[in-house]
Amino acid sequence: MGFSPLSLSQSLSFIMFLFHFHSTISSSHFCAPDQSLSLLQFKESFSINSSASGRCHHPKTESWKEGTGCCLWDGVSCDMKTGHVTALDLSCSMLYGTLHSNSTLFSLHHLQKLDLSDNDFNNSHISPRFGQFSNLTLLNLNSSVFAGQVPSEISHLSKLVSLDLSGNYDPSLEPISFAKLVRNLTELRELDLSRVNMSLVAPNSLTNLSSSLSSLSLWGCGLQGKFPGNIFLLPKLESLDMSYNNRLTGSFPSSNLSNVLSSLDLSNTRISVYLENDLISNLKSLEYMYLRNSNIIRSDLAPLGNLTQLILLDFSSNNFIGEIPSSLGNLVQLRYLKLDSNKFMGQIPDSLGSLLNLRTLSLYGNLFNGTIPSFLFALPSLQYLDLHNNNLIGNISELQHDSLVYLDLSNNHLHGPIPSSIFKQENLEVLILASNSKLTGEISSSICKLRFLRLLDLSNNSLSGSTPLCLGNFSNMLSVLHLGMNNLQGTIPSIFSKNNSLEYLNLNGNELEGKIPPSIISCTLLEVLDLGNNKIEDTFPYFLETLPKLQILVLKSNKLQGFVKGPTTYNSFSKLQIFDISDNNFSESLPTGYFNSLEAMMTWIKK
Ligand SMILES: *[C@@H]1O[C@H](CO)[C@@H](O)[C@H](O)[C@H]1NC(C)=O
Ligand SMILES: *[C@@H]1O[C@H](CO)[C@@H](O)[C@H](O)[C@H]1NC(C)=O
Ligand SMILES: *[C@@H]1O[C@H](CO)[C@@H](O)[C@H](O)[C@H]1NC(C)=O
Ligand SMILES: *[C@@H]1O[C@H](CO)[C@@H](O)[C@H](O)[C@H]1NC(C)=O
Ligand SMILES: *[C@@H]1O[C@H](CO)[C@@H](O)[C@H](O)[C@H]1NC(C)=O
Ligand SMILES: *[C@@H]1O[C@H](CO)[C@@H](O)[C@H](O)[C@H]1NC(C)=O
Ligand SMILES: *[C@@H]1O[C@H](CO)[C@@H](O)[C@H](O)[C@H]1NC(C)=O
Ligand SMILES: *[C@@H]1O[C@H](CO)[C@@H](O)[C@H](O)[C@H]1NC(C)=O
Ligand SMILES: *[C@@H]1O[C@H](CO)[C@@H](O)[C@H](O)[C@H]1NC(C)=O
Ligand SMILES: *[C@@H]1O[C@H](CO)[C@@H](O)[C@H](O)[C@H]1NC(C)=O
Ligand SMILES: *[C@@H]1O[C@H](CO)[C@@H](O)[C@H](O)[C@H]1NC(C)=O
Ligand SMILES: *[C@@H]1O[C@H](CO)[C@@H](O)[C@H](O)[C@H]1NC(C)=O
């Protein structure tokens, strides 16, 4: 064969080709062709569907195109030398469809990390072929709609450091598979099997998990039997979540506790916790302690004051009877303190005033009496304060800061005016001061400066003066406005802005006069409108017929008059279930015309 000399342009392009080829190999552009093909076939087997991902949305496979180096594709990482795909991160990729055992995913043998979390695999079974990824160190199938049995082949993945099968549709894990997993996955540091059905697995077998384990999350696994106290012999265990296993019994151990544990969640279990002095001293590094709705037996909480690293203490719904120990004032790192729904009594102790880092204080549903200590209103970072359902008396002091987002003081015996500083809480979203009977004074129109207010409930007090007229159009976020059962006078706010979010409007039981403002029809999301027990003088407000979501309309005991002739429009009151216009001066007492069209109400009556 002769040697044909290349023309200048030919040799140039040959050199360019060589140069290009060389640079492709030496940079990360190179991708083994079989890997590229497997990925593209994998891509083709799913649709992109925005409801398939919940937490975040990155449709990574959309950037995958034939003829481009797969190592540059979104979510793909390769070994530079071999061009093998070694990591695939397809979290939040909006993938929807079934992941079959014959998927080309399983030909990516060299994977070391695989994250398929937050997609919708439509109740696929977890294929036994996952067990073939022999070099896998990370496997994350969190919240991806997998179901069925977890295959025992998962135990072949002996290099796994992190395994997350949580948040799926109660796939089940057989005791024999779990035993193999415990025996073989000796490198595990993070294990999350939350919502995997482990009801047949003996809790005791957890104690043989990898001694490297630092995080174990098993909420809602249906575990039953005795809490495996020896789990704390795992020397590196920092985080343990066994909440929502309500058949888990036994008691929390009082010795052999881990001194590296920083987060403990035993909420909604039936594990008894005895708060002994030394137990606590064993948990020196604990930062997060969730013991909501569990069995706490020891009636003295004073030892909790030893956990000086605590950032969060949730002790709610425990039927605890007694006082808050003053030692809780030692927990100066606390940001979240929840002691609600117990039987705490006596005064809210002054010692809590030293918790200057508190952001959340939830003490509702107890038997606290005495006044609300003014130090609470001086805590510099307090955002969430809930003291409802107690026996608190006295007035509400002025707030010293403007950090509040949520304030609920309802169902107490507070009296006096609403302090003006409440209206300076620029970020306030929820304000509930209802059912104190004795809150007096006027509702300042500065309330309308609270632009982020979603819920305002001042009902069942003795507030007087006029209803601030700005209430109809100051915050487009407001969805609940309840000022019922007060002594308010004057007229109903007449301007309701377009695009408002009101779902509930209740002014029942005041002394309001005048007419029902037609601009209420701007409240297209309104479900409840209660203007009963006032002094409104008007004719029947036909314009309300078009409110598309109205379910409850109460206009009773006013001075409404005239003839109620029945529907004036097609689709009149299409969702209405309760309709009360009794005790007015209407010339016909039953607008029978409405009853024919009130289908929703009829359905409701038949129930
Ligand atoms: C999108 O996914 C949801 C479930 O996440 C499914 O119900 C729906 O049918 C899917 N839509 C399409 C077009 O596939
Ligand atoms: C989702 O699963 C259902 C029920 O098994 C099946 O009928 C449907 O075809 C599946 N959809 C997809 C996209 O895999
Ligand atoms: C993979 O398996 C599924 C279910 O067994 C089947 O419907 C599909 O055709 C198979 N796909 C290929 C490429 O063989
Ligand atoms: C797994 O890792 C080992 C050691 O790094 C390596 O020799 C082997 O080729 C890898 N196996 C696969 C299938 O990538
Ligand atoms: C698992 O998914 C849930 C819901 O999408 C999310 O709240 C949680 O943070 C995820 N866990 C991890 C470890 O990513
Ligand atoms: C344990 O892992 C090795 C690979 O490291 C595997 O060959 C063996 O089958 C596994 N054993 C079990 C019980 O899964
Ligand atoms: C968990 O598995 C047990 C035993 O197989 C079964 O009785 C139970 O209904 C399952 N629970 C759920 C939530 O699927
Ligand atoms: C834990 O492992 C040891 C040694 O392999 C074994 O003797 C013991 O029975 C195991 N315990 C449990 C509860 O599985
Ligand atoms: C604490 O652990 C040791 C072994 O590490 C064991 O002998 C002892 O019985 C354990 N104590 C309790 C109360 O479980
Ligand atoms: C723990 O708290 C109790 C009660 O407050 C106290 O008597 C005990 O000395 C404290 N223990 C330690 C180690 O601080
Ligand atoms: C608060 O309650 C305690 C007992 O529960 C009682 O001794 C005390 O007198 C009460 N204080 C006030 C101010 O009502
Ligand atoms: C609340 O009461 C205290 C004393 O009982 C009084 O000094 C204070 O001015 C009152 N605050 C308001 C806002 O009425």
Image (cartoon, rainbow, N blue to C red):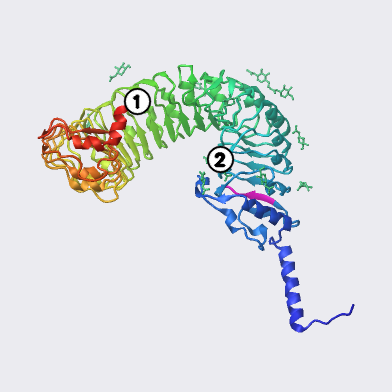
- The segment highlighted magenta reads 86-91
Kind of residue at disc 2 = Ser
Residue 589, can we see it?
yes
| Vertical arrangement, residue 379 with respect to residue 23, above or below | above
Look at label 1 and name its amino acid: Ile
Q: Position of residue 552 (x, y in %)?
A: 26, 35
Q: Is mark 2 within 8 Å of ligand 5?
A: yes
Task: Judge from the rendering whether residue 539 lies leftward or rightward of residue 67; answer left or right.
Answer: left
Q: Quadrant of ligand 11?
A: top left
**220 is within the stretch colored magenta:** no
Q: Which residue is mark 2?
A: 143
- Which image quadrant for residue 350? top left
Q: Is residue 152 left or right of residue 306?
A: right
Disc 1 residue lies near ligand 11 with CB under 8 A: no
**Count of number-bearing discs:** 2
> Does residue 369 lie above or below 103 as drawn?
above
Magenta stretch: residue 90 in it? yes
Between residues 182 and 291, which one lies in front from this camera angle?
182
Q: Callout 1 environment at 10 Å: few (<14), some (14 to 19), or many (20+)?
A: many
Q: Residue 580: x and y, percent?
A: 20, 32
* Between 47 and 353, the one nearer to me in the picture: 47
Residue furthest bottom in the image: 8
On the image, numbered disc 1 is attached to which residue? 348
Residue found 61% across the figure and 27% down from its top? 198
Quadrant of the image occupied by residue 540: top left
